[in-house]
Image (spheres, rainbow, N blue to C red):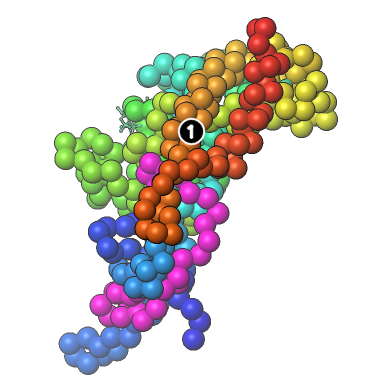
C-alpha cells in the first residue's frame, strides 16, 4: 500500500489536523443497506511516541506520513515528518512558499517608510515576497501608475486589487495556486476581506478567523492553513511582522532587491568584507536608488542588533561549568560558537576600517 502523506493544517494540544494529499473513498451502508461512498480529506492525528522520544516537533505546514488510519473515525498517527524547507516563526509555519504582503493604496494612507519596513521584514525570512495593493477603487489611474512605477524601481511587481470591485483578485489568485502562502500586512488594509474572497467557504468561520486575527478579547495566538479552492494553502499570521528588524548588517543587504541587484552586477566593493555603509570606499551598494536612505537607517538598527547578539553570546558563552572526574564542578572558558567567532573577527576588522567615520 502507498504511504499516506499530507500537510499539517493546524495543531491543537496534542492533535494535528492533517489534510491528505489524496482523499480516501470510504464505503458505507445507509439505513436501507445501500452502499454509498464518502470522501475523507482530513485525519485528526496523534504523534507517534518514537517522534516524541527524538524530540521531533510538528508544525503547521509540515509534510507528514500518517499510519494506521481509522477512516471511519477520521483518526490516524503521524509516523514521520519530512525535512523542512524553511520555518517561519511567530507564529510557526513550515515550508512557506511565499509571503503575500497586503497594503492599501488609501485608507490608511500608503506610507512608503512603513511599506519598506514590512518589505524588509518579509524579505528577512528569505521567502519570496508578493506585494499586493488593495483599495484600488479609492485612487485614480494616475496615483496607481505612480505607485506602480515607484515600487517597480524598488524591485517589486505590485498587483492592484480591490475587494470591493474584485479587480485583480483573479490575477492574484493565480499566484497562490501552489504551495503555502502566508498573508501579512498592516491592520485595516483589507486582509480579512481578501481572505473571504479567496476562500468563500470560510465565510462561515469569519468570526473564528477574527478571533485568531486578534480581534477577539480572549485571543490565543494560533495559526492555521486554509485550502484555496484552486489549490495551495493560505495562512493568516497574527503577530507575524513585528516592527523590529532582527537581521545582521550582512543579512540586511539581501533584504533589498535593489542592493541584491547591485551586488549581482559583477562589480565589487573595495573591501571583500564591505559592510556597505555610507562611508565605505568604492561600495557598489551606494548609489542613487530611492531606498538607499531607508537602507542606511536600517543598517544602524542591524548594527545594534548584531551587537546585542554578540553580547548575549559572550554572556552565555564565556564560562561553562564542567563536571570533573571526581564529581566536582569547575568553571572553564568556553569557546565561542563558530558563528560568533567568525562575526567577531569580521567586525574587529571592520571596526578598524571605520574607526574614523
Ligand atoms: N474602499 C475599499 N475598502 C475596502 C476594500 N477592502 C476592504 N475595505 C475596507 O477596509 C476596512 C478594513 O478591512 P479588513 O478586511 O477588516 O482589513 P484587515 O486587514 O483584515 O484589518 P485587520 O483585521 O485590522 O488586520 C473595512 O472597512 C473594509 O470594508 C477595498 O477594496 N476598497
Ligand atoms: Zn559595499
Residue at left 40%, top 30%? 242
Q: What is the quadrant of residue 13 in the picture?
A: bottom left
* Whether residue 213 is visible: yes
Residue at left 29%, top 74%? 74
Q: In x, y percent, where is residue 118?
A: 48, 27
Asked whether, in this view, residue 94 is left or right of residue 202, the answer is right
Nearest to the observer: residue 335 or residue 84: 335
Q: Which residues are magenta?
A: 64-92
The answer to if 81 sits in the magenta stretch is yes
Element carrying mark 1: helix
Asked whether, in this view, residue 12 is left or right of residue 18, the answer is left
Q: Which residue is mark 1?
A: 314
Nearest to the observer: residue 116 or residue 48: 48
Asked whether, in this view, residue 106 is left or right of residue 30, the answer is right
Nearest to the observer: residue 244 or residue 17: 244
- Confirm or reject: label 1 Cβ below 8 Å from ligand 2: no
Residue at left 32%, top 79%? 71
Q: Quadrant of the C terminus?
A: top right
Q: In x, y percent, where is residue 123?
A: 55, 34
Q: Is residue 279 above or below residue 8?
A: above
Q: In x, y percent, where is residue 10?
A: 33, 57
Q: Residue furthest right?
A: 266
Q: What is the quadrant of residue 40 in the picture?
A: bottom left
Q: Is residue 143 above or below residue 329?
A: above
The answer to if 275 sits in the magenta stretch is no
Residue at left 36%, top 81%? 68
Amino acid at each position: 500500500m502507498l504511504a499516506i502523506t499530507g500537510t499539517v493544517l493546524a495543531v491543537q494540544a496534542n492533535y494535528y489536523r492533517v489534510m491528505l494529499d489524496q482523499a480516501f473513498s470510504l464505503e458505507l451502508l445507509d439505513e436501507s443497506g445501500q452502499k454509498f461512498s464518502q470522501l475523507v480529506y482530513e485525519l485528526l492525528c496523534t504523534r507517534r511516541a518514537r517522534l516524541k522520544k527524538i524530540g521531533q516537533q510538528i508544525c503547521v505546514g509540515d509534510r507528514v506520513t500518517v499510519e494506521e488510519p481509522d477512516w471511519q473515525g477520521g483518526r490516524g498517527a503521524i509516523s514521520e515528518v519530512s525535512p523542512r524547507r524553511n520555518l517561519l516563526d511567530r507564529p510557526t509555519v513550515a515550508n512557506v512558499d511565499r509571503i503575500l504582503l497586503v497594503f492599501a493604496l488609501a485608507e490608511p494612507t500608503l506610507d512608503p517608510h512603513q511599506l519598506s519596513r514590512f518589505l524588509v521584514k518579509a524579505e528577512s525570512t528569505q521567502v519570496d515576497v508578493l506585494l499586493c495593493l488593495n483599495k484600488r477603487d479609492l485612487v485614480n489611474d494616475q496615483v496607481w501608475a505612480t505607485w506602480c512605477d515607484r515600487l517597480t524601481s524598488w524591485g517589486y511587481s505590485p498587483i492592484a486589487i480591490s475587494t470591493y470591485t474584485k479587480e485583480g483578485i483573479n490575477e492574484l489568485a493565480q499566484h497562490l495556486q501552489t504551495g503555502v502562502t502566508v498573508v501579512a500586512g498592516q491592520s485595516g488594509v483589507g486582509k480579512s476581506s481578501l481572505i473571504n474572497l479567496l476562500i468563500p467557504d470560510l465565510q462561515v468561520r469569519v468570526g473564528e478567523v477574527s478571533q485568531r486575527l486578534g480581534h477577539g478579547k480572549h485571543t490565543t495566538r494560533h495559526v492555521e492553513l486554509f485550502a484555496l479552492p484552486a489549490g495551495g494553502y493560505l495562512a493568516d499570521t497574527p503577530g507575524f511582522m513585528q516592527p523590529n528588524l532582527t537581521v545582521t548588517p550582512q543579512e540586511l543587504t539581501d533584504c533589498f532587491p535593489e542592493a541584491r541587484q547591485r551586488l549581482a552586477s559583477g562589480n565589487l566593493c573595495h573591501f571583500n568584507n564591505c559592510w556597505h555603509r555610507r562611508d565605505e570606499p568604492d561600495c557598489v551598494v551606494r548609489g542613487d536608488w530611492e531606498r538607499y536612505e531607508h537602507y542606511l537607517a536600517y543598517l544602524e538598527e542591524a548594527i545594534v542588533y548584531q551587537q546585542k547578539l554578540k553580547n548575549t553570546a559572550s554572556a552565555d558563552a564565556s564560562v561553562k561549568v564542567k563536571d570533573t572526574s571526581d564529581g566536582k564542578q569547575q568553571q572553564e572558558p568556553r569557546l565561542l560558537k563558530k558563528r560568533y567567532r567568525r562575526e567577531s573577527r569580521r567586525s574587529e576588522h571592520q571596526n578598524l576600517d571605520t574607526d574614523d567615520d
